[in-house]
Each structure stands twice: as C-alpha cells, then as structure tokens.
Amino acid sequence: MTAQRLDGKACAKEVELQLGHRIAALNEKGVRPHLAVIIVGNDPASHVYVKSKVKTCERLGIKSTHIELDASTDEATLREHILSMNQQEDLHGILVQSPLPNHMDEEALTDLIHPSKDVDGFHPENLGRLVQGRLDGMLPCTPSGVMRMLNWANIPLRGKRALVLGRSRIVGMPAALLLAARGADATVTVAHSKTEATRELCREADIIVAAVGRADMVRTDWVKPGAVVIDVGINRVDDDSRERGWRLAGDVHPDVEEVASWLSPVPGGVGPMTIAMLMENTVRAAELTIQA
Ligand code: GUN
C-alpha cells in the first residue's frame, strides 16, 4: 500500500480562499483584521514560523504587527505589551510565540491575553470551553488544523480508535479533546513519555496523531496497515550532505507511507493548516467585534 498524501498545503489554500471573502466583507464595513505576533529570543525555528505567519497575513490583507524582543527582556515588559494590546480597539488577535525563555512564566502570560483576542486558543477560558464541548470559540490552531484536514479528505472518525502521541497544551491534549468531541466521535487514547507499550497502542489505532517532537519515532512496525497517520512533528536533524547542515524530519518515518492509507507530509501537511487556522481565528475575532 502507498499512502495517499494528506495535502495540508492544498487544504490551507481552500481555507484562504474562503477567508478572502470574509475579509472583503469586513473591509466593506471599515474593519481590517489585525494580528499581533510577539516573539522573544532567537530560537531559529520560531523565527521561521513567525515570519511565515506574518507573510500569510500580508497575502490575505490582514494587518500584522510583529514585535521582536530580546531574550533577556523581563516578564514585566512582555506583560505590558499584552495589556496594552488588550486595550487596542483596532487589534483583534494576540499571539505570543512559544517557547518563551525559561525566566518567563508562559502560562501566566497566556492568562493575560483577553480571551476574545486569544487567537491561539490557549487561554483557560477558551480551553475550558473546548473541554465543555463548545467548539464555537477560539480553538488551538494546530489541532483544529488537523481536524479540518481530516474532514476535508472525508476521512471517517466516528467510532474509530485514535491514538494521540504527546500530551502538550499546544497540540496533544486539545487534539485528543477534538477527536473525542461530539461530531468527531473517535475513541481516543493519549500516549506520552511515561506510557508503557506505546508501539503496541499505536498498532491498534485507526488514526495516529504524532506530536512528540522526536524525529522519525513512528516506524512502519508501529502502524496498522491502512491506518491514517498525521505527522505534527517538525524536527531539525543534522545532515552534513545539506548545504545548511540540517534537514527537516517529522515524528513519523517516511517509510510509514508503505503501510498507512493516508499520511500527512512534512513539510506541507500540518504546518500550513496551523497558519490557516490562525488566520481564520483572527478573521473571526474581527467579525465578533462588529457583531458585539
Ligand atoms: N509554537 C509552536 N506552535 C505554536 C502555536 O501554535 N502557537 C504559539 N503561540 N506558539 C507555538
């Protein structure tokens, strides 16, 4: 079997097309969606992601404010930025790129973002709504991108066994909630670093969402023939044969395409969907300001 490619880039393009109409409608009412992205420090991968977010804003006609702060910035300064952005009426979304330097309390800072501007969906109010099964709020971008992509490819989830590898706040836990939510109706297992017999659990799954950040961890013998495999990992692996000295690898070994029915590529799978969902959350936040 050769897996079908779960093409996040193509799916994201369709999402962007629909957003274009919504943005035009907002513009007619004198509103331009506006996203602020704050990055602290010099993690190279985070800078690449943030640039990609800003570039997508430009392409769609979403205004963006890009704030880069030095790694030594104190938490109070970042707090002030967030509090002032909460007050700014023409700004609809605030994103603080994770990870933050160790001296900052990431959760406490996330709590400060007004829930209506929390386009990452990480605020306790938005995550709480997700736990309650209210899916009409701001949903975390990567997990909602995964769900959108599965839906787009007409992959059935109801009653299926889904295995989420990883229990992070950003991906694993919200992905598990979305897969188990009414309407998706999968039966979900969350595996993590302390899980025993992870490979055997994976082998029982109809759907695997790999979000652990370990290159090539999921091998062909971890996957049931015909399973759907979503690779959320983006890992930099040393590679002297490349001019830049590294290559990108997912959490799933590329050979898994020999056993899976669907596999999302890295890059070009979940990554573009995460950004598309961020744009959608920003447009939604802007729409809600005129409906309020
Ligand atoms: N770092 C990796 N993924 C994300 C994300 O979705 N949002 C934020 N804010 N930081 C991230």
Image (cartoon, grey):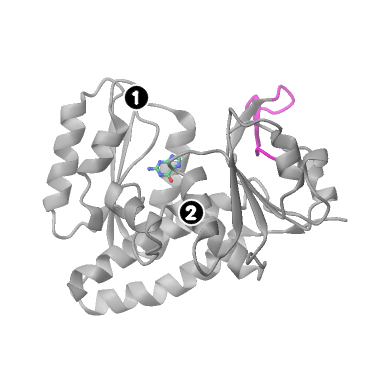
Q: Which residues are magenta?
A: 239-253
Inspect the magenta stretch and tell me whether residue 22 lies in it.
Answer: no
Q: Which mark is residue 194?
A: none
Kindly identify which residue carries mark 1: 101
Q: Residue at x 33, y 52 (%)?
A: 128
Ligand 1 image position (quadrant): top left
Of the pair 235 and 167, the residue shown nearer to us:
167
Looking at the magenta stretch, what is its main secondary structure? loop
Q: Residue at image x 54%, y 66%?
A: 13
Please name the amino acid that badge 1 sits on: Pro
Identified by mark 2, the residue type is Leu
| Above/below status of 59 relative to 80 | below
Mark 1 or mark 2, whichever is nearer to me = 2
In this rendered view, identify the residue nearer to me: 135 or 214.
Answer: 135
> Which quarter shows the N terminus?
bottom right
Is 63 left, or right, of 273 in this rendering?
left
- State the residue position of label 2: 177
Question: Which one is in front, 190 or 143?
Answer: 190
Q: In the image, what residue occupies the spot 52% across and 70% down?
A: 183
Contact? badges 1 and 2 (CB < 8 Å): no
From this view, report whether residue 124 is shown above or below residue 218.
below
Q: Is residue 178 left or right of residue 61?
A: right
Give the total of numbered labels. 2
* Residue 117: quadrant of the picture: bottom left
Q: Is residue 160 above or below residue 213?
A: below
Instruction: Mark 2: give few (<14), some (14-19) or many (20+) Cα within 10 Å.
Output: some
- Residue pushed farthest right? 1
Q: Does the beta carbon of the residue at mark 2 sit less than 8 Å from ligand 1?
A: no
